Amino acid sequence: MTLKFVEGVKADVTTDVVYMMCPMHLLKLEEMIKTLEPGQVLEIMTDYDGALEDIPGWCEKTGNEFLGIEETEDYYKFFIKKKSEVAGV
Amino acid sequence: MTTSEHYFDNVATNPLRAEALEAMMPYLKEEYGNPLSPYPKGSRAKEAIEEAREKTAALIGVKPQGIIFAASGAEANNFAIRGVALAKKDQGNHIIVSKVEHHSILNPARFLEKQGFVVSYLPVNEHGLVDPEMLKKSITDETVLVSLIHASPEVGTIEPIKELVAVAKERGVAFHTDAVASVGNIPVSVDELGVDLMSISAHQFGGPKGAAALYVKQGMRIVPLIYGGIQESGRRAGTENVPAIVGMGRAAELVKDEVSGQAERLSKMRDRLIEGITKVPNVHLTGHPTNRLPGHASFVVEYIEGEAMLLMLAAKGILVASGSACSSKALKASPVLLSMGVSSGVAQGSVVFSMGRETTEADVDYAITEFPQIITRLREISPFAQGWGGQEEGGQCIPKK
């Protein structure tokens, strides 16, 4: 899987799991995405390298759109767009 | 406890409350499920922890999400100091503590020094108080954390945390307080104090040993102390001590309603004890005369040594401490007393009476009667009975010839 790097993505909701242990990045992602409206963007911050595979993989599996990542010195920011309620809409 | 025991060591620990034990019992027996297990036995254990989290949070006036359960006050303190310093290491390498902190603050601070951090150890005045002006002068652009004890278990002094927090906030510095000795003895509100992190321990307020908590302000990053699974939202690994946590929650629920009344009752008993004991010549109260823990009366007795007093008091059924439990065991002069300007000879004669929920007026009467007699007897055989002769280099006292 090729990682997509992005800049300046505006998130509707941000959640910070930096220094929280694996698999909190996936549990929090699942919890937070439920609170979003379809089409809204979630930003998740994590320092866990495994998330580089896990989060795009989770998006592929669940049908949510993985917009890309932004890298800072200490952690990553992942941007995920919540899928529409009905596929194709 | 036998009828001949008069327990005056509530800063060391407290008896487990019957109500807490009762709440714990199912989780020691049939409800042994792992809170992470997905079936009902696990879910019930998880629910029990979350209920305890709510009750513990309510005791200090915070949201349950801010509570991270730990195994001891020492763990909570280590977690706070190391966790925040390491999480903020890119913002600066300076932390500030005081000289009257517990070993579980001072020792991780020393560990951080070895990792390249710079630590300032703030002095205190003769009552054990940290001066907010001194804190102000010590904060630099590199300061990432201030950790100051709320109330001293050794001398009872309650620090002006609110004022100290205000100084740290002016510079945007995170603030932790070790409130192990205060929570359960006086009403404590995180909001009112304004702290970002707070350590508390269950056995200080009638809960079991093996359960404690670190409050962490929402959104504050903290590097874990124990790595592993996702317990405590991935911030403190290890299968939870469900019975102890449940007991902590129940004790927190009880003490929340009782703390004000108990503080009032204990303050009166404390003042009576102080009055009775300080009538003995050359016995001095340590710590702040009024702004101190309600059940806490600490003294230095000149010309005799704390350990001898402890043993003689214990022979009479009076159980007290001399300095901190750790220092007492190591027969070391209390660093807390030394930092308050007490000479090393006098500091050896430290004795701490601390009272709790089960202490009675009769216990106080008994101590006021027995303790002066013990002092007299020990002074008769003390090499320093004629007074301090002088001091060797390093502060050691020489008996007066």
Image (cartoon, coloured by chain):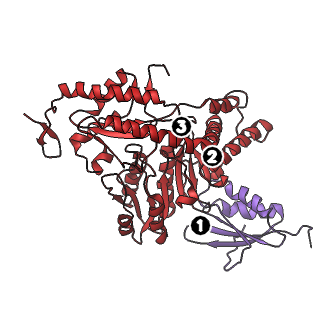
Query: Does the residue at mark 3 contact the one at mark 2 (Cβ under 8 Å)?
Result: no
Apparent colour of chain A: purple
Residue B397 horizontal side relative to residue B225, left or right: left
Q: What residue do we see at 11% from left, 42% from top?
A: B390
Toward which corner of the image does residue A58 lie, by quadrant? bottom right
Q: CA distance from mark 2 to mark 1?
A: 32 Å
Residue placed most toward the observer, B131 or B274: B274
Category of crowding for the residue at label 2, using alpha-carbon neighbours closer than 10 angstroms: few (below 14), some (14–19), many (at least 20): many
Q: Amino acid at mark 2?
A: Thr
Q: Could you say where residue B295 lies in the image, as x and y percent from the top left? A: 45, 40
Rendered hue of chain B is: red
The amino acid type found where label 1 is placed reads: Tyr
Q: Are discs 2 and 1 both within one chain?
A: no
| Quadrant of the rendered image containing residue B117 | bottom left
Q: Which residue is mark 2?
A: B56
Q: Residue furthest bottom?
A: A8
Sooner in the amino-acid sequence: mark 3 or mark 2: 2
Disc 1 is placed on an element classified as loop
The residues tagged by marks 3 and 2 sit, at their Cα atoms, a distance apart of 13 Å
Q: How many marks?
A: 3
The one of B191 and B374 positioned closer to us in this rendering: B374
- Residue B335 drawn at (x, y percent): 31, 46
Amino acid type of the residue that numbered disc 3 sits on in the rendered structure: His
Question: Label 2 is found on which chain of the structure?
Answer: B
User: Do badges 3 and 2 share one subunit?
Assistant: yes
Along the line of sight, the residue nearer the viewer: A30 or A55: A30
Disc 1 designates what residue?
Answer: A75
Q: Which residue is mark 3?
A: B203
Q: Chain of mark 1?
A: A
